[in-house]
Image (spheres, grey):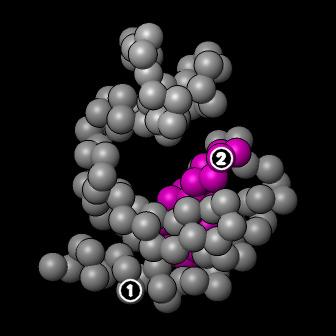
Amino acid sequence: MLSEPPDADPHVRWCGGRRGEPGAYPIEACAAAFGIVVGMSPTIFRDGAFRFFFFSREEERLHVHVQSPDGEAKFWIEPEIELARSYRLSDQDLKRVLELVIDHEQEIRNAWHRHFDR
């Protein structure tokens, strides 16, 4: 079971919920549990509170992750743009994020290929 150290930094990013909520853990602990190296998640672009990025050592199918203070989502880019999963984002936020993914599709593809086709 993952647990928060008593002297945890209040600026640490959290997954599974907000700081202090049941099931919320520092992002580094969640990443380690899934074998993801933190710091290996290049930001493609930001729009307002939304950060669009991908993890360097994740699956090969082209996709993008989106994170905001309110939640997160993952969108497949191939074979077509579609929501893979979401957590705590409102329907309104998901609609906005989908619009942004569609509007920035080529930028996402270019960033993916720059990073992975080395």
Identify the element where label 1 is drawn.
helix
Q: Which residue is drawn at 24% across and 73% down?
A: 116
Mark 1 highlights which residue?
Answer: 110
Local secondary structure at mark 2: loop
Q: Residue furthest right?
A: 92
Q: Residue furthest left?
A: 118
Check residue 66 for magenta coloring: yes
Image location of residue 49, percent across then percent down: 67, 60
**Residue 5, position as x, y percentages in the image:** 40, 14
104, above or below 85, in the image:
below
Depth order, front residue of 82/23: 23
Q: In which quarter of the image is the N terminus?
A: top left
Residue 79 sits inside the magenta stretch: yes
Q: Is 56 displayed left or right of 89 in the figure?
A: left
Q: For residue 51, what is the image quadrant? A: bottom right
Tag shown at residue 69: 2
**Vertical placement of 79 versus 30: above or below?**
below
Along the horizontal axis of the image, is 35 left or right of 85?
left
**Residue 60, image x, y percentages:** 30, 64
Q: What residue type is labelled 1?
A: Asn
State whether residue 8 is above or below residue 12. above
* Predominant SS along the magenta part: strand
Foreground residue among 89 and 42: 42
Q: Residue at x 50, y 59 (%)?
A: 65
Specify start and end residues of the magenta stretch as a single range. 63-83
Q: Residues within 10 Å of mark 2 (few under 14, many from 20)?
A: some
Q: Where is residue 67 in the image (x, y as percent from the top left)?
A: 58, 54
* Of the two numbered discs 2 and 1 in the rendering, the one whose residue sits closer to the viewer: 2
Disc 1 crowd rating (10 Å Cα; few below 14, some 14-19, many 20+) is few
